[in-house]
Image (spheres, grey):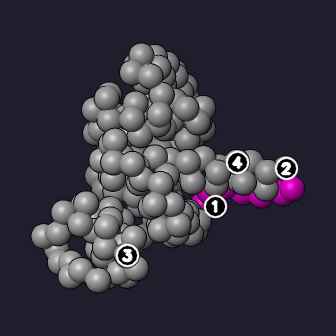
Amino acid sequence: MSNVDASSTEEQLIAATLQGNDDAFRRIVERYIDEVSRTVTGMLGAGPEIDDVVQEVFIKLHRSLHTFRGEAALKTFVIRMAINKSLDALRRRKRMRWLQPWSHDDPWEPPAEDASDARMDREEDLAYLRKAVNQLPEGQRAVVILRLIEDYSTEETALILDIPYGTVLSRLKRGVDKLKTIIRKPSGPGRSGGVS
């Protein structure tokens, strides 16, 4: 088995992993876990299932690494898996809602005593924006998260989602338009129709 370290190339890590080197796979996980976690959290919102979905991504990667052809970067391959596993989790959530129709998604928690007004406003705005993004259809949500939150290029987003370039552009436009509509609607006490 070949030795790997932090400076090993993607190709070296893949080859070593395929030869059974667990340390090589550990290094792959270390390289991509932050991006996978951000992508999954962006798709699902904060919740208890995030760690499970991230773990599922890396289990699937380990099992299917032999199918990686190298036509795109490994990062693209991994992020595509993260999107797909997130979509699976969203479908599971939808099925669970049918089984538990009266459950509460976001129980109210009182703010911490020492929280400043500015921080509370920012946290409230971010939570409001996350809820707005979560209302987008899956395809639009994936594009909005990858393009606007994770800052992938249109080409990278098309590769990750395995959709045409033009589809990325149209989903992004529709998603942004829908977000504007959602954000402009008042939604309960304290919301005047927009997020500052």
Query: Which dot, 1 or 4, sits closer to the camera?
Result: 4
Secondary structure, mark 3, is loop
Assess whether mark 3 and mark 4 are in contact (beta carbons under 8 angstroms).
no
Q: Position of residue 16 (x, y in %)?
A: 31, 73
The residue positioned farthest toward the left in the image shown: 7
Q: Which residue is mark 1?
A: 107
Q: Amino acid at mark 4?
A: Arg
Q: Residues within 10 Å of mark 1 (few under 14, many from 20)?
A: few
**Mark 4: secondary structure:** helix
Which kind of residue does numbered mark 1 sit on? Pro
Gap between marks 2 and 1 measured at Cα: 19 Å
The first of marks 1 and 4 along the sequence is: 4
Hey, which quadrant is residue 146 in on the image? Answer: top left
Task: Give the SS element for disc 2.
Answer: helix
Front residue of 125/54: it is 54
Q: Which residue is mark 3?
A: 19
Q: Residue at x 37, y 75 (%)?
A: 19
Q: Is residue 116 left or right of residue 188?
A: left
Overall secondary structure of the magenta section: loop
Mark 4 to mark 3: distance in Å?
35 Å
Tag 1's secondary structure?
A: loop
Q: CA distance from mark 1 to mark 4?
A: 22 Å
**Is residue 108 magenta-colored?**
yes
N-terminal-most mark, 4 or 3: 3
Region of the chain picked out in magenta, as a range: 99-109
Name the amino acid, label 3.
Gln
Residue underneath mark 2: 98
Res 52 seen here: yes
Asked if marks 4 and 2 touch (Cβ < 8 Å), the reply is: no
- Sequence-wise first label, 2 or 3: 3
Residue holding disc 4: 91
